[in-house]
Amino acid sequence: MASRKKPVYEAVEIADIEYRGHGIARPEGKVLFVEDALPGEVVDARVTKKKKDFAFARVLEYRRLSDKRVEPFCEHFGLCGGCRWQYLSYEDQLSYKQYFVGQVLERIGKFRDLEVPDILGCESDRFYRNKLDFSFAAGRWLTDEEIASGEDVGDRRALGFHVRGRFDRVLDIETCYLQPEPSNEIRRAVRDFTLAEAYSYYDPVNHEGYLRSFIIRTSLAGEVLVIVVFAHEDAGARERLLEFIAERFPQITSLDYIINDSMNDSIAPHDVHHYRGRGYINEVCGPNTLKIHPKSFYQTNPKQAERLYEVVARFAALEGTETVYDLFCGIGSIALYLAGSAARVIGIDNVEEAIENARENTAYNGYENCEFLTGNVRDVLTPEFSSTHPAPDLVVLDPPRAGLHPDVVETLLALRPPHIVYVSCNPATQARDLQMLAGAYRIDAVQPVDMFPQTFHIENVADLRQIPR
């Protein structure tokens, strides 16, 4: 072992892998979570962050490779912050993800005899996303070869993704395998035009520059929505760029822009200005067509979203007489998927814009049995609410990655619906929440669904039934 400040462990064997994708080693009895390392591999690893009982590390050298390791297919792999698992075949990715679900349910949830069925994988492990958010940067990331050459690299403007762990550096992307065309074609054309026309790109350190970010949304219906985010107003420059995009890509369904002059990258507080086209795109989801607006949240893998909702519907097993509560309902995609099989659906979400979109999609698809309410779940589901609304036969939960607030768990335990279907994008927090509900509910089944090939992220659906008092 080397320096005490940032220790290096030599020739450590990776014994296991955990749900965030880190390999697990135990040198000198310490727990070490190693990025980009697989069970069976032997590595030299430098500690990057130390905690009281464990540490994180990155690989300096691979001394022995796993036979599961494959050659990544993307030229940007390793520097780009996405697609972290390209060094695994998709079959092995699915195998590990299924293992993760069982692992966290047992270790965190304490459910030791729960059977985890085969994960539902994607038809294709590439070009599956319907939304990508690219960043303009005044100073692109330089490769080791460029730095070693000592030569002047010239123009350092870039349009692409952030380098892993760096908010201030962007990797210029040539081809991305995440989103179907015309995504790459549009991005490359915008980059080339703005470079040639001397547009300034944003510098997040000094907060200077004009072009900030660039968002492309696509749909299974073949429609395209584009948003350009500018750092300040310049009507002439804005008009030239938007007109170029509109003329070069007449197939764009909705072309929009945002002025974000704040110190952070979030577009949520800023108005969307519609420039050309319809103002939204249509997305097909089972029996429904959903309007997706520039800031709408929708599952980023639309084909797998349908499979995920099929699992929810199968677990729900509705007969047409039930009242369903859809908590954290977003734009109402799950609520509307179930609406045709339920007597009544009530959706709750704390984002007013999402609720407005849910109501719009309800009317768009002709449902008359849906009601959507704005507010935090724990604030809406009060005794007064229960006195004016029918009790739920089924509650569907689809919370953010942090899982359920303890107050929401208490509300559920007080409400005691006979049936809960819990959809989670973070099986670890789901396992924690399921343990808090375990005294009142049993788990009848779980079903993992892969939404994000080339990453360790996974969705899991749990079917809960009330335990009689």
Image (cartoon, grey):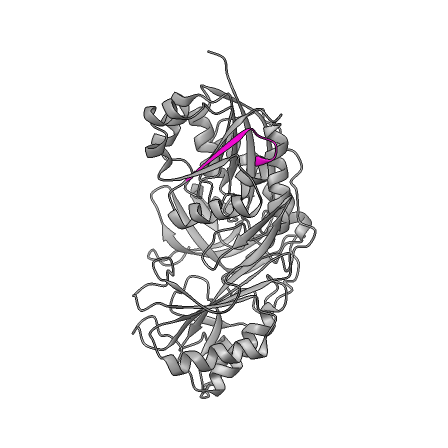
Residue at 46% in and 85% down:
153
Residue 319: x and y in percent read 62, 25
Tell me: 445 left or right of 425: right
Which one is in front, 210 or 292? 292
**Location of residue 85 by image quarter:** bottom right
Which span is picked out in magenta? 339-348
Residue at 34% in and 30% down:
407
The answer to whether residue 413 is above or below residue 155 is above
Which one is in front, 162 or 217? 217
Residue at 37% in and 53% down:
49
Which one is in front, 197 or 94? 197
Q: Is residue 344 magenta?
A: yes
The answer to whether residue 79 is visible is no
Q: Is residue 288 magenta?
A: no
Residue 39: x and y in percent read 59, 47
The answer to whether residue 258 is visible is yes
Which one is in front, 92 or 434? 434
The answer to whether residue 213 is above or below residue 52 is below
The answer to whether residue 419 is above or below residue 192 is above
Instruction: Report the number of numbered marks.
Output: 0
Quadrant containing the N terminus is: bottom left
Residue 88: x and y in percent read 63, 54
**Location of residue 307 by image quarter:** top right
Residue 26: x and y in percent read 47, 44
